[in-house]
Amino acid sequence: MAGGTGGGETITMSTHESAVQAAHAHGAPQGFIRKWVFSLDHKVIGLQYYFLALVAVFVGMFLSLLMRIHLIWPTVALPLLGDIKPETYLTLVTMHGTIMVFFVLTTAPQGGFGNYFLPIQIGAPDMAFPVLNMLSFWTTLVGFIVMIAAFFVAGGAPLHGWTGYAPLSAVQSTGPGEGLGADLWIISIAIFCIGALMGALNFITTTLDMRAKGMTMMRMPLTVWAWFVTAILGLLAFGVLLSAGILLLMDRNLGTSFYVPLITVNGQLTGHKGGSPLLWQHLFWFFGHPEVYIAILPAMGLASQLLSVFSRKPIFGYKAMVYAILGIGFLGFMVWGHHMFMSGMSPYTAFAFSIMTMGIGVPSAIKTFNWLGTIWGGRIRFDSPMLFAIGFVSLFVSGGISGPFLAQPVLDIQLHDTYFVPGHFHLIMGVASIFGIFAATYYWFPKMFGRMMNESLARWHFWFSFIGTYAIFMPMHYLGMAGMPRRYSQMTEVGYLLDLIPLQKFITYAAFITIAGQLIFLVNLFWSMFKGKKAVDNPWEATTLEWTTATPPPHDNFGGHTPVVHNGPYEYGVPGAPRDYVMQTDPEIEPAH
Amino acid sequence: MAESALHDIPSVYEPSLFGTYSKKIGMWLFLLSDSLTFGALLYAYSYGRISTANWPTPFHSASIVNATVMTAFLLTSSLTMVLAVRASVDRNAKAQTLWLLATMVCGVGFIVLHGREWSNLIAEGLTLPMFPAVPGHEAASEFVNVSKTVPQFAATFFGLTGMHMLHVTLGVIYLGVVALRRKFIPILLVLWLVAWLGTPVYSPFHYGAHVLLIAAIVISIILWLKPKVYDSSDVEVAGLYWHFVDLVWMFIFPLVYLMSAKIL
């Protein structure tokens, strides 16, 4: 498509070529190893992150499948795996949560798509620190391998939940997985933290320092804003988790008592005294709450992008969107105490955390209304990326509505540790973010692989995922309100919960069907990679810089020159323009809105 | 360096933050993150201290004097670091290397004094439950009682100062790479062997020495990937890190040592 090549390119190549080469210190790599394995190219590293997350998500999904099976057929012995004991169930809970949160929701949207598209969208030839970028991926991969290794050591994987609450996590004798398995779990998280920190400071520096001429902060696509703020959150949050993890390792292996009071385990004194489990909760949740925004912010940025592209309208309230992202990021650090209402904290403290938490509803609502404002009256194209973007907004709202419930200390005391909570956070942070990943995959696949994904398979995948997600997680809210506690392995013979078993069965059947639906995605992904229809440079008629370059982009992204930006990222339906969109590199237009 | 050369040509990129180069921004960001890492440790220390009735104040004057000398070493090293940065700006390569080496010597002095301090305290009975006992030695000072009654004291002491010592060690290695590049790797390996084989098996440093080996491996990989010559910007950025590590000590010294000195 001719429109995709950015007709407004005015830069003279000869003048700037040397500067770009200087910025892009490493030349195009030669040989398979340097090109695809130990690559310094942010695009290859982005793909490496993406496929790491793809492996991780199927591992995590498999674990959740085992959990769902066990919940309704607790006594059944599975082929190869045998029967699931209560402690095995806790192991499944722990590893499902950890793998999903760290190696999928943190890895794919930020490490994967952020790595691939942040430099291209701001007109940079690569990240600011390519070597650091490579190291951050390999660090993350080592973290994943260590995490998976926890399954195979004596005692198996830990059972302290993804939140690793002390003293369960801090004393070796508390359970079968709390020996070497738990050590590996903590070491894996620590390694992940280091990788995430390296990535975060790379993202921030790149955004601040590598923007092409004309790409002012307020001309950056909202995806870039989201990755940027996510990186700031990561920079501030992972350092704290690293410290918390080091202290936890000391408690476990050097006999210190940071997190362990004077307690007995199985009738034996642990030898610890004087510590406080609440210290862990504070340190963990100071990381943990920003972490949920690390998972969701990139998807928010992406939804903003796609709703504008596929509605053929400028994003509604660009500045408000930017400030809302910043506001969410800032407030994200103020609210960790709402995870600890049950800890016996002072009601005044709980009140402050509660008010702050509900305050997040304001920027979230700004974003939601702006999304609706964006598609309102648009000429909407229901391509698969748009379906998933709309799906994201739907899940974000549905999951978000239950947030203010849980933010009230009075209600939270009732709902805490019931299925209401998994229902809430799976919708808003888990699956909403996954929908962001799907939307990003369908949207950018043509740029990444030069081929289109199959649209009918994509639509089937969307409806399986969308309906399936609601079928799984909506009933969990009812389970929770009816008093079904989370994390318990065998609830089929508890008298007061007997009436809820049909609902649990329904959730499990829905999970079977939804997981089967994900195979459609897998088939589509790999089939399209090799057999898909050839893609043009700008198949969605979008305006941002990645669509001005070749498909897939060359090693230095723009083939030896740096683009010059004249327009904002959302110039759709501009009156008087020759076509309904104006590329960022096109000659400057008068702002009509 | 590449990034600074880049910004000499203003027409290609937007002006960078504060007009500075990427590596400097990257280091400031790292320091921001690292200050939260230390902040979390200091928070854990304060939490333990506040929630413990009768926090002990056992540091006798020998410890305080030793820690004061250590502080002097670090402060001096900040001065020599500033001189190294100035030499690099003046493009005086010889003076730059010499001042960097002087900074490293001060840093190593700090580590050695600190290591001796740890060993003495462990011998006197301030220890963690899993630290191996010193063979043939029965500790009989006040510290034995402190370790038993307030385990948080030893835990926070070794946790905070250990993390800081790790940072100083990595700083010395960092400066060594900036000053000597590849030539530093064999030196580092010799230091590793000395630290590993020269410490008794019951000493924590016998195991901690392997940090040097890991660092040597990582440095080899990085220098293989990016075999460039370091210039004044690298010295300046390394200086930022070094001053930060000094600054952290200015929190740890009063909080951990002075506030637990016997005279109080």
Image: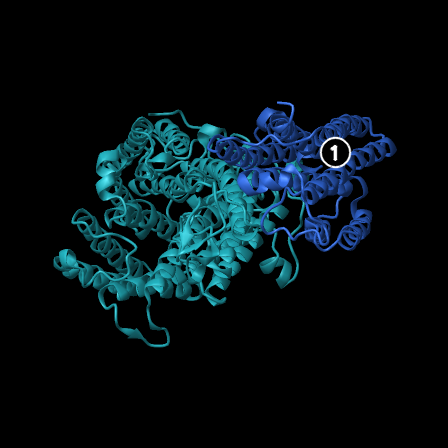
Chain colours: A cyan, B blue
Residue lying farthest to the bottom in this orientation: A79
* Residue A32: x %, y % from top left: 62, 63
For image coordinates 79% across by 28% down, the residue present is B80
Mark 1, residue position: B235
| Dot 1 crowding, Cα within 10 Å, few <14, some 14–19, many 20+ | many
Quadrant hosting residue A400: top left
- Residue A522 lies, with reference to residue A562, above or below; the image says below
Which chain is mark 1 on? B
For image coordinates 21% across by 64% down, the residue present is A509
- Would you say A557 lies left or right of A298 here? right
- Would you say B96 lies left or right of A480 here? right
* Residue B216: x %, y % from top left: 73, 51
- Residue B120 lies, with reference to residue B232, above or below; the image says below
Residue lying farthest to the left in this orientation: A499
For image coordinates 32% across by 47% down, the residue present is A432
- Residue in front for this viewpoint, B156 or B90: B156
What's under tag 1, amino acid-wise?
A: Val
- Would you say B101 lies left or right of A62 here? right
- Residue in front for this viewpoint, B22 or A192: A192
* Residue A282: x %, y % from top left: 42, 37
